[in-house]
Image (tube, rainbow, N blue to C red):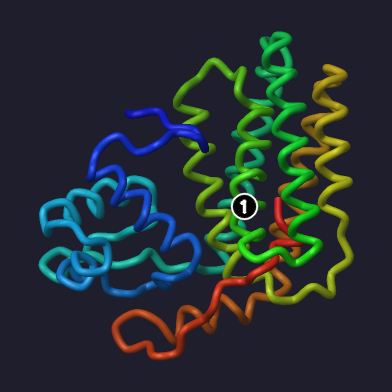
Amino acid sequence: MTETTPDTPPRTRVEETLHAIRRDIVSGALEPGAKLAVEPLRERYGVGSSTIREALSLLIPDGLVTARGQRGFAVSPISIDDLRDLGRTRILLETHALRESIAEGDDDWEAGIVAAFHRLGKAQEALDQGVPGSAGDWEVRNHQFHAALTAACRSRWVRHMLDILHHHSERYRRFALTDRTVPRDVHAEHVALMEATLARDVDTACEVAAMHIQRTTDVLAQVEGTFEAAASTNGDGGSRRMAPADTPRDAT
């Protein structure tokens, strides 16, 4: 296993291509169920066929790409059941990692949380002001904040799995969060999470984290029709493109 973080830069052409394909899957540029033919992807990313195949193969264990035997590759589908399973799994792992990080974290760990929260706050301000490109920057900063909270967890496997789960969570947010009618203050939730963590209040921090993640699942589940539309209009015969949400105000 090669451990990565939200800040890990690609080191090879294959990794660079993998990051680009993953970014396009998560953002919705490559839709759920869509075929991933090698030739169009080779032209899209400007690399060779073998690089594309290797990058796609490496995305299969992460659950973003499926192999169809002789039919090639496809973007993994989305569903309401998968969303709920994702939320439950993320709560299980993230609260475990947070509990261990609070027990093991040092001053540098605390400083990393404060710095990540500060950057997330700046991204939130840009998002609220409608700055172009701010939604993508917010997602990166949000990922970094959650990774900072659990950075002192000793298990590299748990950290790796959390990284994978974050990409899947972002994918659902970008597809489903077009409805802003559900009242929610995500910034306040992040403040509460940071304060409980830095206070070393394990039970409160884990409770806040679990509620934070479950709240996102509940909000996304209210737009279940979005997932049904994605499933019915993409893949082998799909034609309608669903644009990803531009402003993840109800994200986690």
The tally of labels here is 1
Residue 14 pos. (x, y %): 23, 45
Q: Quadrant of the N terminus?
A: top left
Give SS at disc 1: helix
- Quick check: 93 left or right of 216? left
Residue 147 pos. (x, y %): 61, 33
Front position in the image: 229 or 193: 193
For image coordinates 30% across by 34% down, the residue present is: 11
Binning the other alpha carbons within 10 Å of mark 1 as few (below 14), some (14 to 19) or many (20 upward) gives: some
For image coordinates 57% across by 52% down, the residue present is: 86
Write down the quadrant of residue 101 in the picture. top right
Eyeballing the image, is 198 above or below 46?
above
Front position in the image: 215 or 144: 144
For image coordinates 82% across by 35% down, the residue present is: 193
Amino acid type of the residue that numbered disc 1 sits on in the rendered structure = Asp
Write down the quadrant of residue 195 in the picture. top right
- Quick check: 96 left or right of 210? left
Residue receiving disc 1:
137
Residue 26 pos. (x, y %): 48, 60
Eyeballing the image, is 77 above or below 134?
below
Residue 174 pos. (x, y %): 59, 66
- Quick check: 125 left or right of 57? right
For image coordinates 79% across by 44% down, the residue present is: 121
